[in-house]
Image (cartoon, rainbow, N blue to C red):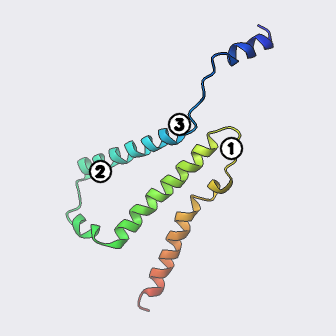
Amino acid sequence: MKTEHLITALATGIDPVDRRAPLRAGGMALLAGTLLAAVLMWWLLELNPALPAFVGEPMFWIKLGFGLLLAGSSLLLVSRLARPGFAASFASWLPLVPVLVFWVLGVAVLLAGAP
């Protein structure tokens, strides 16, 4: 087969590709993984009896938010890198934002503590 025939065969019947497909697939995988991890943790390790008291603490939500922000920003970066021709640009720095916020919160907690 000649190169021109191969290119013609590959170029026929092209349908537009959904640009959000990698982000949607990654989001579904993230959701499924989170649910599976929660079910396995509950089934294998059982829940901590003090969990209702922890839910009322702000640090519980900060830790949960850290993981979600880190996973979400990484998913956005990976979805941009999965498409040819797209530069990572600002998305390459997004996973650092939750880490920096967590460091700032840690320093604030340390400074607010008693000497």
Q: Residue at x 58, y 46 (%)?
A: 78
- Amino acid type, callout 1: Phe
Left or right of residue 107, residue 57 in this image:
left
From what the image shows, is residue 36 above or below residue 73? above
Q: Residue at x 41, y 91 (%)?
A: 114
Does the residue at mark 3 contact the one at mark 1 (Cβ under 8 Å)? Answer: no
From what the image shows, is residue 108 above or below residue 59? below
Q: Residue at x 58, y 37 (%)?
A: 19
Check the picture and name the quadrant holding the C terminus. bottom left
Q: CA distance from mark 2 to mark 1?
A: 38 Å
Q: Residue at x 56, y 64 (%)?
A: 97
Q: Disc 2 or disc 3, which is closer to the eye?
A: 3
Does the residue at mark 2 contact the one at mark 3 (Cβ under 8 Å)? Answer: no
Q: Earlier in the sequence, mark 3 or mark 1?
A: 3
- Amino acid type, callout 2: Met
The residue that mark 3 highlights is: 21
The residue that mark 1 highlights is: 86
Left or right of residue 69, residue 64 in this image:
left
Residue 6: x and y in percent read: 74, 13
Residue 4: x and y in percent read: 79, 13
Q: Quadrant of residue 28?
A: top left
Disc number placed over residue 33 in the picture, else none: none
Which residue reaches farthest bottom?
A: 115
Check the picture and name the quadrant holding the N terminus. top right
Q: Element type at marker 2?
A: helix
Q: CA distance from mark 2 to mark 3?
A: 30 Å
Q: Earlier in the sequence, mark 2 or mark 3?
A: 3
Q: Element type at marker 1?
A: loop
Disc number placed over residue 41 in the picture, else none: 2
Q: CA distance from mark 3 to mark 1?
A: 15 Å
Q: Quadrant of residue 80?
A: top right
